[in-house]
Amino acid sequence: MEKQIKVIARYHYEHEYFVEVSHEDSFTAGRDYWLCKRGSTRKLFMFSSPYKDARIEERMILRTIPSCIERYESAENIRTA
């Protein structure tokens, strides 16, 4: 059985970062939020959550993104060291 996972939204942020929102075609699945950076193939998992509405989704992303960017940058520095 193959899962159907679709990217359903992208939220652009500063410094070439964006959040990709994916959804699995399943009645129990929520949304997964991934931090991405333009020009990179790496993604950092941020969190999963059921969808409520766009304003709540944006607030969750804004609350979480600073610490996720720190983790992303830390991992990048380790990889290049």
Image (cartoon, rainbow, N blue to C red):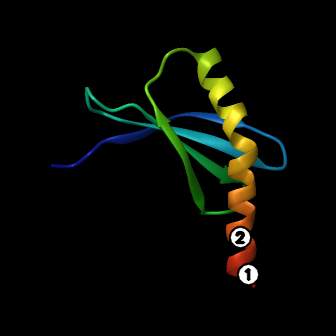
Helix, strand or loop under label 1 = helix
Give x and y (percent) for residue 37.
71, 54
Q: Is residue 63 above or below residue 55?
A: below
Horizontal placement of 68 versus 25: left or right? right
Under mark 1, the amino acid is Thr
Question: What separation in Å lies between label 2 and label 1 (alpha carbons)?
Answer: 6 Å
Q: In which quarter of the image is residue 20?
A: top right
Q: Is residue 23 above or below residue 73?
A: above
Q: How crowded is mark 2: few (under 14 residues within 10 Å), some or many (20 or more)?
A: few
The residue lying at 42 percent from left, 39 percent from top is 6
- Marks 2/1 in contact by CB < 8 Å: the verdict is yes
Helix, strand or loop under label 2 = helix
Pick whichever, 27 or 7, lies toward us: 27
Residue with the most extreme left position: 1
Give x and y (percent) for residue 17.
74, 48
Disc 1 target residue:
80
